[in-house]
Amino acid sequence: GAVVSQHPSWVICKSGTSVKIECRSLDFQATTMFWYRQFPKQSLMLMATSNEGSKATYEQGVEKDKFLINHASLTLSTLTVTSAHPEDSSFYICSARVRLGTDLSYEQYFGPGTRLTVT
Amino acid sequence: GEDVEQSLFLSVREGDSSVINCTYTDSSSTYLYWYKQEPGAGLQLLTYIFSNMDMKQDQRLTVLLNKKDKHLSLRIADTQTGDSAIYFCAEKGYGGATNKLIFGTGTLLAVQP
């Protein structure tokens, strides 16, 4: 099946610094990737939808200048948390969408997640 | 807006059946999904059902859909300790490529040996 990887899997950074998280589709091309945020014991919250070669679409309440998303190729999207603060500490999960030739037109495959801790 | 609700916690004994329930509000949902999340990991798609189906069975998993009541359930037969995880239902509305998944609140399944 389709594999999505994320790097790093875990990062600790100091308050005020920026952190970049990579999301890669390993064996397929993904025109659309999604970035989610998950707080402990809570559901996934969609942050933004990223289409290759165009600007990301952010969900209401998500600061686009704080969470920079770049989708420069069909296999790579990056999320940069700028000037991180402790409240940005969370589990960030990306997913990549692929077109299937079955009754399910599109399927989303999820990465393993990146745990960010800001001290 | 769309809202997807699940019970927070379910505890079962190994070998019993587990039934995880989900309710949603968007009547235009076309696909409904069940995902499994193990601790510290991403989401794994378990199964899905198209909105014009009532039931789908895949090995130990049975999905039931009551579209009238907007109620979705996942039954896991012969539950094993390895099934312990958080289970999320998700719905996707009509509209093809641009529609996003709306996730439920998640149900923590604890399987007692």
Image: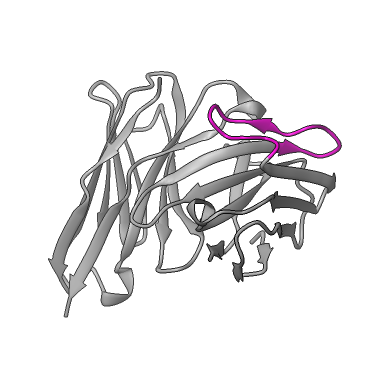
Which span is picked out in magenta? A50-65
Q: Quadrant of residue A18?
A: bottom right
Which one is nearer the viewer's eye here, B9 or A82?
Answer: A82
* The furthest residue to the bottom: B113
- Classify residue B37 as left or right of residue A22: left
Name the residue: 76% across, 61% down: A27
Q: Is residue B31 visible?
A: yes
Does B98 sit above or below residue A22? above
Name the residue: 24% across, 61% down: B109
Which one is nearer the viewer's eye here, A67 or A32?
Answer: A67
User: What kind of secondary structure does the magenta stretch mostly adopt?
Assistant: loop
Residue B113 x/y as whole percent? 16, 80
Does B97 sit above or below residue A91? above
User: Is the N terminus of chain B in the top left, top right, bottom left or bottom right quadrant?
Assistant: top left
Q: How many marks?
A: 0
Q: Is residue B77 visible?
A: no
Which one is nearer the viewer's eye here, A88 or B7?
Answer: A88
Q: Quadrant of residue A8?
A: bottom right
Residue A14 x/y as whole percent? 61, 66
Name the residue: 72% across, 43% down: A68
Residue B2 x/y as whole percent? 40, 24
Whether the magenta-drawn stretch holds residue B105 is answered as no
Name the residue: 49% across, 66% down: B41
* The furthest residue to the front: A16
Whether the magenta-drawn stretch holds residue A56 is answered as yes
User: What coloring was used for the rendering?
Assistant: one colour
Does B41 sit above or below residue A51? below
Residue B82 x/y as whole percent? 33, 75
